[in-house]
Amino acid sequence: MCGIAGSVNQPLDIPLLTRTLYHRGPDEQTTFSEQGLVLHHHRLAILDIAGGRQPMHYEHLTIIFNGEIYNHQEVRTKHGLKCATHSDTETILHAYARVGASCLNDFDGMFALAIYDKSKQELFLARDRAGKKPLYYYADGDKFIFASELNAISRQVKLQVNEEHLHQYVRMGYFYKEATPYKNVHELPAGSYAYISLQKPDVRISRWWDIHSFYSQKSADDFTTALQRTDALLHQAVKRRVESSDLEVGSFLSGGIDSGLVTAIAKNYNSSLKTFTVSFDGEYDEAPLAKKVADRYHTHHTEIRISFDNLVNDIEKILGNYGEPFFDSSAIPSYYVSREAKKYLTVILNGDGGDELFGGYRRYVPFAKYDFFNPGFLIKPIAALAKGLLPVPHSKKSKYNFIYRLADLASKKSGLDTYLSATIDSFEGLEKYLAATDIVLSKVENDFSIVNRSGLSGLQKIMNLDFDNILAGNLLVKMDIATMAHSLEGRSPLLSREILEYIPSVNDEFKIKGGQTKYLLRKLAEKYLPGELINQPKRGFEIPLKKWIDHELKDIIASYILSPDAYCRNFVQPAFIENLWERKMKTGDEKRAKMLWTLFALEVWYKKCFIQ
C-alpha cells in the first residue's frame, strides 16, 4: 500500500509532495525523472519488504504502484513470468510487458498504478474494478499531474473551482464518477485505464471492467450450489488476503455478518488472528455481539473504546483530509477507529462491499418486489397525494419512516430522483431551494436512464447503481482516506475478483427473500457464526449526527454556514439555510441534519483546502 504521484511537462515540488503524501507511505520516498516525466512513490512496505522498492524498472518499462495484487503468484504461473523478487509490483510489470492492458483482467486486488513506456513515450494509468485505490489527475492540454489524493494536486498547481460539480455534490452528496470540485481535475473512474502521450499529454480513457455486464448474466445455479460456491470463493479471497503479506494481518470485527464471516474464515489461515471491535457512545454498541465471534474462534481480541471528546478540535482536519467536500459523517468514527487500530498492526481485513453485492440495505426490500424506477402513470399521482397527507418522520429506523419513504419513492418524476430519494435523501423534495437548475444533473440522468432501460430487475438496477455510485464515490473513498491517514491498509475480501464476477448474476431471491435482506450470506453465516448475529439488522456506525449538530459541533457549524460570506450560499438559498438552522422548515430531524452537514463539509473544504 502506497501513495503515488507524477507529472508530464510540469515540475513538482518534491519536498511539498513528500509532506502531503507522507502518511500514505512513511517507509520510503523515491523519485524518478526523465525527459519531462516525473514519477514519485511513497512506500508502505507490506509485501517483499526487501525486494519491492519502487519505482521498479524492467526493460523499457517503469512502474509506480499503490495497492496489492493478492493472486500475483498465480498470474506469474499463468503467463510463465520469470521474476527476480517476490513482489507483486514486479508481477504487474512483467505481465504488462507480456500482454499489455489485458493483464488487468487477471488481477485479484486493489490497485492504482502508473507505467511509463519509454519506447512509446507513453504513460499508462489504471484502477481496480471497484475503485478501492484512488487516482486523480490534472490535465490542461500541455501539462499533466496525477496523484493518489486531491490535496497532493491542489498544492502543486493553482486550481479553479468547478461550480457545476459542486452543485452536483450538494444534490447528490458525493462527486459523480470522474467529477471533482476543481476544473481540469478528474478522478480516473473505477475499472478504467488511460494512456497519456508524453509528446502531447491528452488523456485517452477506456473502461476495462463494468459490473453491469455481470448483472446482465443469469446464473443457472440453484440456491444450494450458489451457497457452496460463495463459501468457496470467500475462502479463496480471505486466504489470499491473509497470506499476501509479510506483516501480520488482523481483522475488524463488528456485530455484523460480513466482518463476522471474514473473521471466522481468516482464523483458518492465521491461527493467532488479532481482532478489533469498536465501542463508542451512541445508540447501539456492537461490542457484545462481536465478542461472541471472538470467543468462538479464540482470537486475540481487543475492544477499542472511541471517545468523541476532542471532536470539535479534530473535525476540520478529518474533513480536510479528503481534499473535497465529503458528506458522509461516518468518516468521523472511521478516522478514530483507524487511528487506534494502527497502534496494533498495519494490515486489517474488513467487510466492505457485502451490502452492495449481497443485498444488505433495507431499501433493497421494496425494489425486490417492485420496480420503483418505473412505477406507472397511475401510481405516481396517488403516491404523491399520500405523501402530501402524511407528516414527516423524525426517526430513520421506524416502520412509519419506511412507509413514508415508499410513498416518496413511488411519487418521483425521474429515475435519478427515485434513486437519490432511496439513498442519500438530503435535499430531495426541496430542490426549489437549490441555486442550480436540473441541467447540472443532465449527464447523471442520462447515465441512469441507460441502466433503467437495460432490462434489469428493480433490485438489480439499484444494486448496480449503488456499486457504481455510493460504494465507489463515497464508501471506498471514506475508508481509503480514513485508513491511509494513519498508514493503515484495509483489505476487503468481499470485493475479490471472483465474487464481483459471480454474485451479481445469481437469482434476486438469493439476496432478498421476502423481507429478509442478505439472505445468501445469512444462510452461510449459520455455518460459521453465533445465532444472535445472523438476524441482526444492518447497522453500521451509529452516528449521533443530530446530537452533534445541536450540541458538540453547534458553534463551529454555525460559524461556517451562517456567516454572511459563506460559500455555500452560492448553492443553496441563504434564507433556506437560516430557516433550516432555526427549525422553521417542515422537514424531519434526520434530513435536516444531513442537509446541514452537506453544507458544513462544503464550507470546510472551501476554507481549509481551496483558499489556504
Image (cartoon, helix red, strand yellow):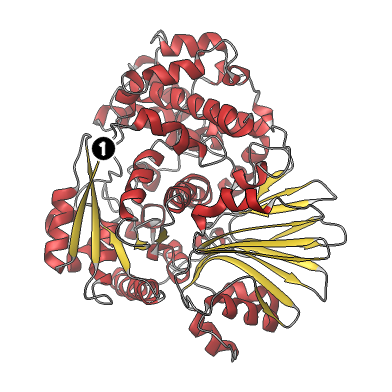
Q: Position of residue 478 (x, y in %)?
A: 45, 46
Quarter of the figure that contains the C terminus: top right
Which residue reaches farthest right?
199
Q: What element carries label 1?
A: loop
As drawn, is 482 to the left or to the right of 260?
A: right
Residue at which label 1 appears? 307
Residue 140 rendering spot, x and y as whole percentages: 81, 46
Farthest residue toward the front?
15
Q: Which residue is drawn at 63% across and 40% down?
A: 444
Residue 205 at what x, y percent from top left? 72, 58
Residue sitting at 72 percent across and 52 percent down?
Answer: 12
Q: Residue 202, relative to residue 605: is it above or below?
A: below
Which residue occupies the foreground of this view, 562 or 13?
Answer: 13
Q: What residue type is labelled 1?
A: Ser
Q: Is residue 240 left or right of residue 110?
A: left
Residue 395 vs 456, above or below: the answer is above
Query: Which quadrant holds residue 225?
Result: bottom left
Instruction: Examine the rendering and report whether any part of residue 222 can be seen.
Output: no
Q: Position of residue 499 (x, y in %)?
A: 42, 68
**Observer-nearest of 590 and 302:** 302
Sort mark 1 into few (<14), some (14-19) or many (20+) by Cα contacts within 10 Å: few
Between 279 and 427, the residue placed more toward the observer is 279
The quadrant where residue 506 appears? bottom left
Q: Can residue 144 be seen in this view?
A: yes
Q: Which residue is drawn at 40% across and 21% down?
A: 592
- Measured along the vertical axis of the image, is residue 554 above or below residue 182? above
Q: How many marks?
A: 1
